[in-house]
Image (spheres, rainbow, N blue to C red):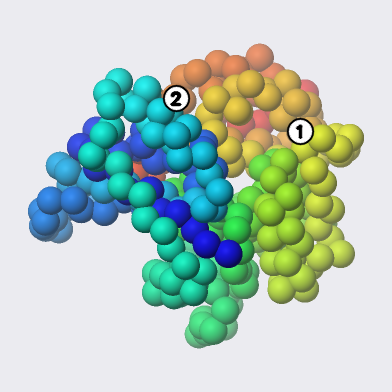
């Protein structure tokens, strides 16, 4: 199998939008790096600083429609990206090497760790999710996922029924099971995501507790906790479907939201949910809401 990397040059104000576009087009991973050799000295606490000139790189299956990629980015940015978009073929073994080079065990909150194959975590109280994402997005490295993982670490979800809507690699549902959830329903429309979720559940010895469903399947019974880590536009479009999956008094986590999109997403769910103060990282926000009785 082969891959395609799309490198897009832009300024710091465009980076989050380009990142969102690449994910919506099916990028398996997105990274933002310096495009101008600009050093960043130690920033103030809580400050997230991007380089003035950034390079946003998305990893795609080599079969992606390149013309659609080009036209979508150009239309969203309001200009022809022209020479600022570079496409690079990547062999399977190169992708695996790049993956191993940049993914190490990561800690979320007090006890939750995500660990790739071949690494150890020397923490006696650690709750460990063993993860190799395969072709599905979701390793914990992106703020949209790490915000959800930290919430799971900080709340008691023992014996709760959980739905992971848009499960990707299965990381959030598997983390919930490792933290004591009674059962998890993992839903996605992408067959590669469903396979990755199944494989990762087997790796973590919790496959029997993970009910994997395609998005076109009949909806599952409502749950105590529903997590939807997808794009803001999809969260808004599917508000009735997602909201109906939450038990009265149950918790809803909405992630994949840029800070400029918070009001729109909150308004879409406000009739049935009470929202807690948002949690943010970089330009991304996770919303926690409780369903009204």
Q: Position of residue 124 (x, y in %)?
A: 57, 83
| Disc number placed over residue 218 in the picture, else none | none
Q: Single out the mark in the foreground, 2 or 1.
A: 2
Q: Is residue 55 above or below residue 290?
A: below
Question: Residue visible at 12% across and 51% down?
Answer: 36
Q: Secondary structure at mark 1?
A: strand
Residue occupied by mark 2: 261
Residue occupied by mark 1: 246
Q: Tell me whether circle 2 and circle 1 mark residues in contact (CB < 8 Å).
A: no
47 and 104: which is toward the camera: 104
Judged left or right of residue 130, residue 65 is left
Q: Which numbered disc flags the more N-terminal residue, 2 or 1?
A: 1
Q: Report the quarter where the C terminus lies.
A: top right
Q: Report the quarter where the N terminus lies.
A: bottom right
CA distance separating discs 2 and 1: 22 Å
Question: Residue visible at 27% across and 23% down?
Answer: 79
Q: Position of residue 74 (x, y in %)?
A: 34, 27
């Amino acid at each position: 199998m082969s891959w395609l990397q799309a490198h897009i040059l832009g300024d710091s104000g465009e980076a989050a939008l380009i990142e969102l576009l690449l994910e919506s087009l099916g990028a398996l991973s997105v990274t933002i790096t310096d495009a101008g050799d600009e050093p960043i000295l130690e920033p103030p606490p809580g400050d997230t600083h991007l380089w003035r000139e950034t390079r946003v790189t998305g990893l795609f299956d080599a079969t992606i429609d390149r013309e659609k990629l080009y036209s979508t980015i150009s239309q969203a940015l309001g200009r022809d990206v022209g020479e600022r978009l570079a496409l690079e073929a990547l062999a399977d073994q190169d992708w695996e090497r790049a993956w191993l080079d940049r993914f190490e065990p990561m800690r979320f909150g007090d006890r939750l760790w995500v660990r790739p194959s071949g690494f150890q975590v020397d923490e006696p109280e650690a709750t460990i999710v063993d993860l190799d994402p395969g072709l599905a997005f979701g390793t914990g490295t992106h703020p949209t996922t790490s915000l959800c993982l930290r919430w799971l670490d900080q709340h008691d979800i023992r014996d709760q029924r959980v739905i992971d809507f848009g499960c990707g690699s299965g990381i959030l549902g598997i983390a919930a099971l490792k933290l004591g959830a009674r059962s998890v329903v993992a839903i996605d429309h992408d067959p590669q995501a469903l396979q990755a979720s199944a494989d990762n559940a087997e790796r973590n010895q919790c496959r029997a507790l993970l009910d994997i469903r395609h998005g076109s399947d009949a909806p599952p019974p409502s749950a105590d906790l529903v997590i939807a880590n997808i794009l803001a536009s999809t969260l808004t479009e599917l508000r009735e479907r997602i909201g109906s999956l939450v038990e009265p008094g149950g918790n809803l986590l909405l992630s994949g939201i840029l800070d400029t999109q918070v009001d729109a997403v909150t308004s879409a769910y406000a009739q049935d949910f009470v929202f807690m103060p948002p949690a943010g990282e970089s330009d991304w926000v996770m919303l926690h809401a409780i369903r009204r009785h």
